Image (tube, rainbow, N blue to C red):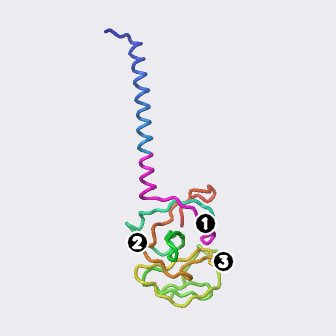
Amino acid sequence: MHHTENEQQITSGKGHRRSGFQLWLRDFIVSVMASFFIITFLYQPVRVEGTSMQPELRDQDRLFVNKFAYDIEKISRGDVVVFYYPRDLSKSYIKRVIGLPGDDIRIREGRVYVNGKLLDEPYVPRSYRDVRSMGDLTVPPNEYFVMGDHRSISSDSRDFGPVPRKLIYGKAAFVYWPADNMGLVH
Protein backbone atom coordinates (compact mmCIF):
# COMPACT_ATOMS: atom_id res chain seq x y z
CA MET A 1 0.00 0.00 0.00
CA HIS A 2 1.29 3.41 -0.90
CA HIS A 3 1.06 6.21 1.74
CA THR A 4 1.18 9.87 1.01
CA GLU A 5 3.37 12.19 3.03
CA ASN A 6 0.32 13.57 4.89
CA GLU A 7 -0.85 10.12 5.92
CA GLN A 8 2.57 9.28 7.34
CA GLN A 9 2.57 12.47 9.42
CA ILE A 10 -0.84 11.69 10.89
CA THR A 11 0.17 8.15 11.77
CA SER A 12 3.43 9.42 13.19
CA GLY A 13 1.55 12.07 15.22
CA LYS A 14 -0.78 9.49 16.81
CA GLY A 15 2.13 7.19 17.61
CA HIS A 16 4.07 10.09 19.08
CA ARG A 17 1.19 11.09 21.36
CA ARG A 18 0.79 7.53 22.54
CA SER A 19 4.49 7.16 23.36
CA GLY A 20 4.40 10.58 25.10
CA PHE A 21 1.60 9.33 27.34
CA GLN A 22 3.45 6.09 27.95
CA LEU A 23 6.56 8.05 28.97
CA TRP A 24 4.49 10.24 31.28
CA LEU A 25 2.83 7.18 32.82
CA ARG A 26 6.19 5.45 33.27
CA ASP A 27 7.67 8.57 34.90
CA PHE A 28 4.63 8.90 37.16
CA ILE A 29 4.84 5.26 38.30
CA VAL A 30 8.60 5.54 38.93
CA SER A 31 8.02 8.76 40.93
CA VAL A 32 5.31 7.14 43.06
CA MET A 33 7.50 4.09 43.70
CA ALA A 34 10.52 6.27 44.58
CA SER A 35 8.38 8.39 46.94
CA PHE A 36 6.98 5.27 48.58
CA PHE A 37 10.49 3.87 49.03
CA ILE A 38 11.84 7.13 50.48
CA ILE A 39 8.95 7.62 52.90
CA THR A 40 8.82 3.97 53.92
CA PHE A 41 12.51 3.30 54.37
CA LEU A 42 14.39 6.61 54.61
CA TYR A 43 12.15 9.47 55.74
CA GLN A 44 9.05 9.52 57.87
CA PRO A 45 6.75 12.54 58.10
CA VAL A 46 5.92 13.52 61.69
CA ARG A 47 4.02 16.32 63.40
CA VAL A 48 5.42 18.14 66.41
CA GLU A 49 3.03 18.20 69.35
CA GLY A 50 3.94 20.67 72.05
CA THR A 51 6.36 23.54 72.51
CA SER A 52 9.35 21.94 74.25
CA MET A 53 11.58 22.32 71.16
CA GLN A 54 10.83 25.98 70.47
CA PRO A 55 12.14 28.07 68.85
CA GLU A 56 13.65 25.47 66.43
CA LEU A 57 10.45 23.43 66.18
CA ARG A 58 7.00 24.78 66.94
CA ASP A 59 3.76 23.09 67.92
CA GLN A 60 2.12 21.51 64.85
CA ASP A 61 5.20 21.84 62.60
CA ARG A 62 5.44 19.02 60.05
CA LEU A 63 8.86 17.58 59.39
CA PHE A 64 10.67 14.66 57.85
CA VAL A 65 12.65 12.35 60.10
CA ASN A 66 15.59 10.53 58.55
CA LYS A 67 15.16 6.92 59.73
CA PHE A 68 18.36 5.76 58.03
CA ALA A 69 20.82 8.41 59.33
CA TYR A 70 22.03 6.49 62.36
CA ASP A 71 22.62 3.32 60.39
CA ILE A 72 25.51 5.10 58.64
CA GLU A 73 26.57 7.79 61.12
CA LYS A 74 26.88 8.12 64.87
CA ILE A 75 24.49 10.10 67.02
CA SER A 76 26.19 13.39 67.83
CA ARG A 77 25.76 15.98 70.54
CA GLY A 78 23.37 18.63 69.24
CA ASP A 79 21.39 16.28 66.97
CA VAL A 80 17.61 16.59 67.19
CA VAL A 81 16.34 13.02 67.52
CA VAL A 82 12.97 11.29 67.56
CA PHE A 83 12.54 8.39 69.96
CA TYR A 84 9.98 6.23 71.68
CA TYR A 85 9.21 7.66 75.11
CA PRO A 86 10.88 5.28 77.59
CA ARG A 87 7.87 5.25 79.96
CA ASP A 88 5.25 4.66 77.23
CA LEU A 89 6.52 3.15 73.96
CA SER A 90 3.31 4.11 72.16
CA LYS A 91 4.42 7.78 72.32
CA SER A 92 7.23 9.48 70.43
CA TYR A 93 9.27 12.45 71.68
CA ILE A 94 11.60 14.82 69.88
CA LYS A 95 14.55 16.31 71.79
CA ARG A 96 18.14 17.47 71.35
CA VAL A 97 21.05 15.18 72.27
CA ILE A 98 23.08 16.76 75.08
CA GLY A 99 25.08 13.84 76.45
CA LEU A 100 26.66 10.83 74.73
CA PRO A 101 27.45 7.45 76.29
CA GLY A 102 30.11 7.92 78.99
CA ASP A 103 29.64 11.70 79.30
CA ASP A 104 29.41 13.23 82.77
CA ILE A 105 26.42 15.60 82.93
CA ARG A 106 25.89 18.26 85.58
CA ILE A 107 23.18 20.92 85.57
CA ARG A 108 23.56 23.86 87.96
CA GLU A 109 20.91 26.59 87.97
CA GLY A 110 20.00 25.78 84.37
CA ARG A 111 23.57 25.73 83.06
CA VAL A 112 24.59 22.40 81.52
CA TYR A 113 28.11 21.06 82.01
CA VAL A 114 29.37 18.13 79.93
CA ASN A 115 32.58 16.50 81.15
CA GLY A 116 33.24 19.52 83.37
CA LYS A 117 32.86 22.14 80.61
CA LEU A 118 29.95 24.56 80.26
CA LEU A 119 28.00 23.57 77.15
CA ASP A 120 27.51 26.40 74.63
CA GLU A 121 23.82 26.25 73.70
CA PRO A 122 22.95 28.96 71.15
CA TYR A 123 19.71 27.07 70.35
CA VAL A 124 18.29 27.92 73.81
CA PRO A 125 17.13 31.57 73.91
CA ARG A 126 17.62 33.35 77.23
CA SER A 127 13.85 33.59 77.79
CA TYR A 128 13.53 29.77 77.44
CA ARG A 129 16.18 28.91 80.04
CA ASP A 130 15.33 27.76 83.53
CA VAL A 131 17.20 27.57 86.83
CA ARG A 132 16.68 23.89 87.45
CA SER A 133 19.59 21.85 88.81
CA MET A 134 20.27 18.14 88.55
CA GLY A 135 22.70 15.89 90.38
CA ASP A 136 25.75 14.58 88.54
CA LEU A 137 25.09 11.75 86.13
CA THR A 138 27.28 9.59 83.93
CA VAL A 139 25.41 8.59 80.77
CA PRO A 140 25.36 4.77 80.62
CA PRO A 141 26.70 2.83 77.61
CA ASN A 142 24.32 2.85 74.61
CA GLU A 143 22.20 5.63 76.12
CA TYR A 144 21.81 9.35 75.40
CA PHE A 145 20.91 12.33 77.58
CA VAL A 146 18.33 14.50 75.77
CA MET A 147 16.73 17.86 76.52
CA GLY A 148 14.19 20.17 74.93
CA ASP A 149 15.30 23.61 73.76
CA HIS A 150 12.50 25.30 75.73
CA ARG A 151 14.00 24.24 79.04
CA SER A 152 11.41 25.81 81.32
CA ILE A 153 8.61 23.54 80.02
CA SER A 154 10.46 20.48 78.69
CA SER A 155 9.99 16.97 80.03
CA ASP A 156 13.28 15.32 79.13
CA SER A 157 16.17 13.21 80.48
CA ARG A 158 16.13 15.33 83.65
CA ASP A 159 12.76 13.67 84.33
CA PHE A 160 12.83 10.24 82.66
CA GLY A 161 16.56 9.58 82.46
CA PRO A 162 18.83 8.83 79.50
CA VAL A 163 17.25 7.27 76.42
CA PRO A 164 18.47 3.83 75.27
CA ARG A 165 19.88 3.81 71.72
CA LYS A 166 17.36 1.15 70.66
CA LEU A 167 14.50 3.64 71.28
CA ILE A 168 15.96 6.33 68.99
CA TYR A 169 14.53 5.80 65.53
CA GLY A 170 15.43 8.90 63.58
CA LYS A 171 17.08 12.26 63.14
CA ALA A 172 14.94 15.35 62.51
CA ALA A 173 15.90 16.49 59.03
CA PHE A 174 13.62 19.03 57.37
CA VAL A 175 10.55 21.08 58.31
CA TYR A 176 8.18 21.17 55.36
CA TRP A 177 5.16 22.90 56.92
CA PRO A 178 4.30 25.65 57.68
CA ALA A 179 6.12 27.40 54.88
CA ASP A 180 7.45 30.21 57.11
CA ASN A 181 9.39 27.67 59.18
CA MET A 182 10.49 25.50 56.21
CA GLY A 183 14.11 24.42 56.24
CA LEU A 184 16.73 22.12 57.70
CA VAL A 185 16.59 21.30 61.40
CA HIS A 186 19.69 22.51 63.25
Q: Quadrant of residue 42?
A: bottom left
Residue at the limit of the structure toward the left, as seen here: 1
Q: Amino acid at mark 1?
A: Glu
Magenta highlight on residue 46: yes
In space, the residues marked 3 and 1 are separated at their CA atoms by 22 Å
Residue type at mark 3 is Arg
Judged from the image, the secondary structure of the residue bearing numbered disc 3 is helix
The numbered mark, 2 or 3, whose residue comes first in the sequence reads 2
Which residues are the magenta region?
Answer: 32-58
SS under mark 1: loop
Extreme-bottom residue of the structure: 135
Q: Residue at x 65, y 76 (%)?
A: 128
Mark 3, residue position = 126
Q: Earlier in the sequence, mark 3 or mark 1?
A: 1
**Which residue carries the number 1 mark?**
49
Tell me the mark number nearer the camera, choosing from 2 and 1.
1
Residue 74 is tagged as 2
Front residue (pair 5, 161)? 161
66 up-or-down from 7: above or below: below
